[in-house]
Image (tube, helix red, strand yellow):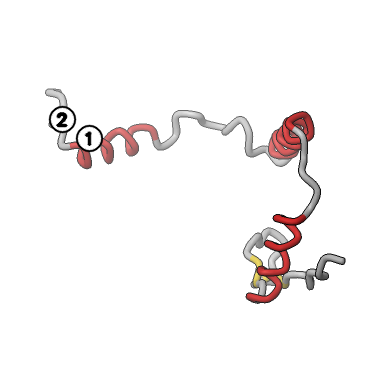
Amino acid sequence: MPPTIPPATPQSNKPSSVMLSISKTSWEALEQVWQNGPQTSFEQRLRLLDLMYKHAQTLGKIPPKDPLKGLETAIRISRITNGVDQPPH
């Protein structure tokens, strides 16, 4: 019989908090259940991916409201880290 996994406790009382505190023994039990649990088929994984994508859409996270937001910053950072000079203005 797989070990039981104690519930994780939120680190904050805020409803939007996604940070969870989990003990080392709980984490190891979760890993054991994950590794020894039933294997999922490719079709099951695709179905899960589809459900997660739909859930993200429901939450308003996909697609982003402004898909180009932060693009200029990302380009600037990549130019700096790759040593590319700025194009002339």
Q: CA distance from mark 1 to mark 2?
A: 7 Å
Q: In the picture, residue 32 is in which quadrant?
A: bottom right
Tell me which residue sits at (33%, 38%) in the image: 73
Q: Can the viewer see residue 11?
A: yes
Q: In the picture, residue 52 is in which quadrant?
A: top right
Q: Give residue 37's mark.
A: none
Q: In the picture, residue 5 is in which quadrant?
A: bottom right
At mark 1, the secondary structure is helix
Quick one: 27 or 58, which is closer to the camera?
Answer: 27
Q: Give residue 79's mark.
A: 1
Q: Is residue 69 left or right of residue 10?
A: left
Q: Is residue 4 left or right of residue 87?
A: right
The quadrant of the picture occupied by the C terminus is: top left
Q: Which residue is mark 2?
A: 86
Q: Amino acid at mark 2?
A: Gln
At mark 2, the secondary structure is loop
Q: Position of residue 4 (x, y in %)?
A: 83, 70
